[in-house]
Amino acid sequence: MDEGTTKATKVMARVMMIGFGVQIILGAAWACLQFPHLQEFGETRFLLKVQESLVCDEYVGILYPILLRIVLGIAKVIPIPYQCYLYALQLAFATWSARFFLKSFPRLGRMGKAFQCWAVLGMVTIPFAMQCHMAVLPNSLAGSLFLTHAGLAVRGFLSWNAPSGEKDERPALRIALMGACWLGEELLLPLWRILGGVLTAGYGIAEILHCKVGKDETKKELQKMIRIVLVTAVLLGMIPQISRLTTTKGAYGRMGDSPEAAAMRRYAWDDFGELFKYWPEELKTALTQEEIALCNEYPEQKLWILGQKIDGVYGREKAREIYQAVADAGRKVRAKRNLKEMVRDAAGYAFAPIAQVILMDGKGQKSYSASNYEIMRMHFPRLTSLYVRYGGWLFAFAACICLILFVGSLLKMDGKQRFCHLGNGLVFLVFGAFLILFYVLRGGGIMDPKNVLSVTLLWAAWACISASKGFSGAKK
């Protein structure tokens, strides 16, 4: 622990620790009561259908349906509800991945076991994280894999400045492990082929640039760089192909996932019929007024309705042209409104727990957050309301404390220390900002906290690391 830690820092850190302790108690109570129950997500019903044939379209990965088939088989032999097996697995992996990520940072690794346990449970019991862990959905496992993926990258970056005896001498192996995480993420949630690929490729390129290969360098350094290049290239070429082999595009009649479709979701998704006069004739004649109204009321229905009426009739290439025309109209006609919505979506994704509390108070924008909360509170409404509200305001408090401690530490440091401190902050900023930007550009009016579970977990990890500065119980 740094000797210059102020009394105010210690007080804020201890208050934050108490706050997370209350959240852990509420989260544990909610999980125990929820354990025998199934949350009624539409995606859960669809996944149960997919596991029967293991035929996946571009929106669903094959790994979770396989896992579902396995636990359904176990439930027939041992008569325990199948979801209980999944909940136990997801909670166990979430706990392990949180511990792995936190211990990637030397400060947390030096703290005592009691503090480490508190930090891990604080991350696991974030309300919407817990909702994912206690749901038959792939988001929990994908989020845990991402934490493991990011933890590997953090350990690699920090090893560059480690003493010679502690440096990472096997970066190619680390990249291979990151590739395994990327493959798992992609086979759970196909959208993560981009997110996981960027993280893996970015780290591989950084390691290549870090290699010191020159006249005075050893043959060993050159061999290390060659191994890094080969492993990175093989992963980038192989993993996207594995995902394609497990996917049958349009298998269930949903709208194709393409850049043009994403642009339409971003610029013309909510109030779909508002741009009717700018629509291409093919789209005007394809949809009835009842279908347009249904699309406006239930955004998810657009995937099915447009998939049947546009992709299914005109083919995917023509459909992409139609979607691009609608997106262009939305971009021109509603430019200011779209910009405001993008800023609002980014804020909602970045501070999802706070956005949920605002939504519960009747404010905020229309999104999937409301339906997620209604599903979560189905069996225990009062406890869920207390749990979610408390988690949201604790998140706001912890975020403020993190920023105060970060800026305070920055002001007390010299040039080199300040640069390293900023680098640690950028680890969280870059990971989180990329995830937020990705989902903001994927569509408007469809904000779903489950998509950015990893962003919320990164905030919680930062809070735990900041709180560790207020304790002198670190091991020497």
Image (cartoon, grey):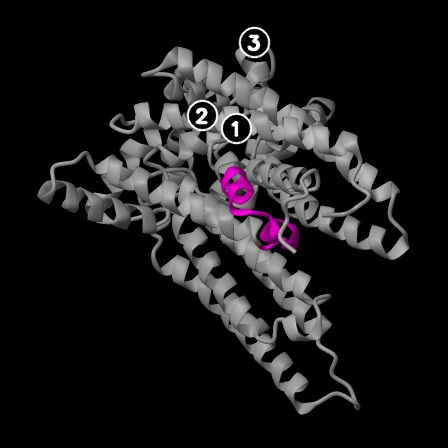
Q: Is residue 33 found inside the magenta-colored segment of the image? A: no
Q: Is the magenta stretch mostly helix, strand or loop?
A: helix
Provide the residue designation for mark 1.
Answer: 21
Picture quadrant of residue 60: top left
Q: What stretch is highlighted in magenta?
A: 104-120
Label 3 crowd bin: few (<14), some (14–19), many (20+), radius 10 Å: few
Residue ID at (52%, 37%): 118
**Which residue carries the number 3 mark?**
361
115 is within the stretch colored magenta: yes
Within 10 Å of the Cα at label 1, are there few (<14), some (14-19), or many (20+) other Cα atoms?
some
The answer to whether residue 51 is left or right of residue 105 is left
Q: Where is residue 33 in the image (x, y as percent from the top left)?
A: 31, 23
Pointer 2: what residue?
25
Query: Badges 1 and 2: C-beta atoms under 8 Å apart?
Result: yes
- Of the two numbered discs 3 and 2 in the rendering, the one whose residue sits closer to the viewer: 2
Q: In the image, what residue type sits under mark 1?
A: Gly
**Badge 3 amino acid:** Asp
What quarter of the picture does the C terminus occupy?
bottom right
The secondary structure type at the circle numbered 1 is: helix
Q: Is residue 383 visible?
A: yes
Gap between marks 1 and 2, in whole Å? Answer: 6 Å
* Residue contact between numbered discs 3 and 2, judged by CB atoms under 8 Å: no
| Residue 35, percent from left and from top | 29, 29
> Mark 1 vs mark 3: which is more N-terminal?
1
